Image (cartoon, rainbow, N blue to C red):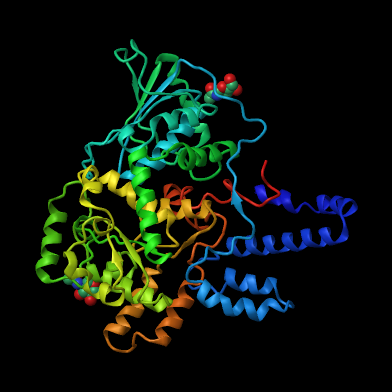
Amino acid sequence: MAYSRAFNPRRVKFLSRKLHPITFYLVLLVAFFLFTLIYISRKGLEGVGQKAASSEEIRSERVQGDDDILHSKVIMQGEQLWTPSFSFGLHPCVKPTSKYKAAQETNRFITVRSNGGLNQMRTGISDMVAVARIMNATLVVPQLDRRSFWKDSSSFEDIFDVDHFINNLERDVRVIRELPKGLESIPHARRHFGSWSSMGYYEELTHLFKDYQVIHVPKSDSRLANNDLPLDIQRLRCRALYQALHFSPPIEILGKKLVERLRSRKGKYIALHLRYEKDMLSFTGCTYGLTEAESEELRIMRESTSHWKVKKINSTEQRNEGSCPLTPKEVGIFLRALGYPSSTLIYIAAGEIYGGSNQLLELASRFPNLIFKETLASAEELEDFTDHASQTAALDYIISVESDVFVPSYSGNMARAVEGHRRFLGHRRTISPDRKGLVEVFDRIESREMNEGSSLSRKVRKMHENRQGAPRIRRTAAPGVRGRARFRDEESFYENPYPECICTRKRQL
Ligand SMILES: *[C@@H]1O[C@H](CO)[C@@H](O)[C@H](O)[C@H]1NC(C)=O
Ligand SMILES: *[C@@H]1O[C@H](CO)[C@@H](O)[C@H](O)[C@H]1NC(C)=O
């Protein structure tokens, strides 16, 4: 593991000869806490139902013996709602290592069609940048999928700043806007890359360039492994996603404006990614809290959507497994139980909520300051975005990354991408609801065994102590999981780019 180097005892000994004793003591102390942190995170710091110490506990432990300890416990309660997780001096690091060589001009080309929604495309494009680097090929600016469910006709330059993308990656990969004339009409190798493929897989595939100058890749999502790749490739993925793939100027400008507008209202805000769109509910078969007519409508939609393979879903079982998005009402109960006051400003990052404003009543009664794109921006400002799902998603993305607290009501590409970006930027607070645990609690409220009061609050807070986006090394697959299931089980690289792109001060390279 890359980390072991920082704790090499010989190195510590060496330091002790050179440094002032107090500095040495501090180094040891920092090393000890990092070690504790890593040890705990390996054991599943954020694992459900485990009795591992939370980051907040570590933090108190750190000052044990200090006069500060009482003070730190007192500020914890209020601060904990809004501040970034205590991040142990970690910071983003994406610089290449010293062996990294600048990209060279090549006559091998990769063309890509990026599939999926906005965040699937963003992470897929970043992977393709890394793949082009591994294969020593020139990358042609990816085409975006216009046929997918999202039916967005936006081109790459409508969503991303294409000049910035090309220039920013200059040293890493040569990127061009279009295939050179003359290469368009010659035969291309069309190749579906395997999902979660390794470095070796792509090195091997370079043999295709013996017969073809151009490889066309029809899909870009999750084509590269999360783990076991060289540090320079992993960091390139971070540079591609966080530094090269900027949104186009109109999106960036409006996004910033909307963030400022939110801040001018109350200073702090929660961004709630509320997955409660019709297609989401129909696909997951989650009908809890809906009327019979609504459930029926969702069932019919599912059965008539040919590419959704699972048709029969027992909504109760689905919900009990924690596989349903929280309902707006449940989100309301959840956030109140965590201690957010009802005056809290909540930005709703979402598509169209199924059931419309009726469905939001119980959330709005607990948190009257709900804000939507449509109430934050004027009709003129939104005009150019409205028919482009990916562009409105980009606005939601910006507002979510910049929020003080991010809460996704369900997991998905957007939730993962935003969480990872927030970790990268300084472990900004992201609260991931323990949906399975919460459902039990909600059912007890429903059956009146429990009230929305202080005992609920204690329970919910306890349950989420370790689900607030505190630093931890990316989770690998559970020990027993083998084969392809392993890739599904492990945490995605872009959900948590630690340790490769997040470092302690000593390990910059
Ligand atoms: C890419 O180019 C570098 C330097 O020219 C070379 O060392 C490496 O083997 C090449 N990789 C592949 C997969 O062809
Ligand atoms: C769905 O599952 C629940 C719990 O297992 C069960 O009680 C219920 O009868 C099931 N419903 C249907 C329609 O099968």
* Foreground pick, 45 / 320: 45
Q: Position of residue 216 (x, y in %)?
A: 35, 25
Q: Is residue 360 visible?
A: yes
View extreme (top): residue: 182
* Foreground pick, 223 / 185: 185
Q: Position of residue 93 (x, y in %)?
A: 60, 45
Ligand 2 visible in quadrant: bottom left
**Residue lying at 52% horizontally and 32% vertically, measured from the top left:** 200
**Residue lying at 24% horizontally and 44% vertically, measured from the top left:** 385
Q: Is residue 413 visible?
A: no
View extreme (left): residue: 293
**Residue lying at 46% horizontally and 77% vertically, measured from the top left:** 461
Left or right? Give the position of 508 relative to 186: right
Left or right? Give the position of 445 relative to 96: left
Vertical position of residue 324 compared to residue 66: above or below: above
Left or right? Give the position of 103 relative to 312: right
View extreme (bottom): residue: 449
View extreme (front): residue: 264
**Residue lying at 83% horizontally and 51% vertically, measured from the top left:** 10
Q: Residue 194 falls in which quadrant of the image?
A: top left
Quadrant into which the C terminus falls: top right
The tally of labels here is 0
* Foreground pick, 284 / 464: 464
Q: Position of residue 491 (x, y in %)?
A: 47, 53
Q: Position of residue 257 (x, y in %)?
A: 36, 50
